[in-house]
Amino acid sequence: MLDPTGQVPTGLTIEEASSRTGVSAHTLRYYERIGLMDPVPRGPGGHRRYTDDDLGRVVFLTLLRQTGMSIRDMQRFVELTRQGDHTIADRVDVLVDHRARLRAHVELLTRHLAALETKIGVYRTILGVEHPTPDDEPALAGVKEQP
Amino acid sequence: MLDPTGQVPTGLTIEEASSRTGVSAHTLRYYERIGLMDPVPRGPGGHRRYTDDDLGRVVFLTLLRQTGMSIRDMQRFVELTRQGDHTIADRVDVLVDHRARLRAHVELLTRHLAALETKIGVYRTILGVEHPTPDDEPALAGVKEQP
DNA sequence: CTAGGGATTCGAGCGCGCTCGAAGTCAAGG
DNA sequence: CCTTGACTTCGAGCGCGCTCGAATCCCTAG
């Protein structure tokens, strides 16, 4: 493990970074290719070694993606970051806009969720309401029905 | 507008249905093609005339889509519907599962929203907090952060 | 030295959910 | 009559976000 110079490679391999972030190695390379990540430092043999900062970046990118920001918009945001501190106000604008969209989206989903509850209620009523709705908390417990 | 027989075509044209549901005419035809909608009744000239029931169906399909159900799963659900009342319990199962995923998704988004607030806060701090953040009350009541 | 394993780059391919365009039909209006 | 325009069917195409596979390279173990 130790090399003769005493240098221990620092940082995580791409596989380790993948398992810690939940992002596939393929996707990690892809993000780097398209400029969402700055070139990740390389260890011996040109292998990527992810630093904590790199991981943090990945996590943030994942947050943006999962909240519906497009790859293209993420690229624009990252470009702002690269341009230095004088773009911080712009970055805040982007994030605030994104937050607004996200809030609206969450509200929409919440309304849809309520409508879905109603629909389920209607169906259950049709089935005959023996059960005093033992269903409003288990989620994964597994939904039993009986005739 | 009135034809000699006194027959007034009933229901909405595809364009009207589109503007009322927010779903494009292209997509309405597509949904019918792939079996998400039963064949919509036709008026003179073979043109579609959407009934209120049809619109209701479109709205429900839209809800499922917007909450992340795949077209494929929607097709399976619709197929159950077509098979008659004895599939109601199965339909409930599908909807309950979907509700669980939706709840989890909303929770994830809510956590991401909180993280986003934090990030914005950090950036604002860097900018120097002249502005007493005139932004932390609108939209949603949920999710407050405090330093 | 050889073999193995896991990384590298790169472009191509894929699944999803539309989205579009071509070609045709029909009814009303001038 | 002919035009206009909104509809019809159908298959093809598109944009997105990955996802994969081939070829190559490097390091380590035996």
Image (tube, coloured by chain):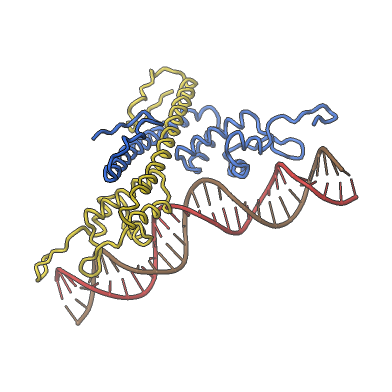
Chain colours: A yellow, B blue, C brown, D red
Write down the quadrant of residue D28 in the picture: bottom left
* Image location of residue A85, percent across then percent down: 30, 53
Q: Is residue B55 left or right of residue A53?
A: right
Q: Position of residue A101 (x, y in %)?
A: 43, 39
Residue A9: x %, y % from top left: 16, 63
Residue that protrudes farthest toward the front in the picture: B130
On the picture, is B1 further left or further right than A23?
A: right
The percent coordinates of residue A115 (x first, y second) are 47, 27
Quadrant of the snapshot with the N terminus of chain B:
top right
Image quadrant for the C terminus of chain B?
A: top left
Instruction: Identify whether A55 is placed above or below B61.
Output: below
Question: Along the horizontal axis of the image, is D1 left or right of B116?
Answer: right
Question: Between residues A79 and B90, which one lies in front from this camera angle?
Answer: A79
Instruction: Please name the residue shown 65% across and 30% down the image.
Output: B51
Looking at the image, which is closer to me, A100 or B133? B133
Residue B15 found in image quarter: top right
**Residue under the point 45% across and 23% down:** A121
Total marks placed: 0
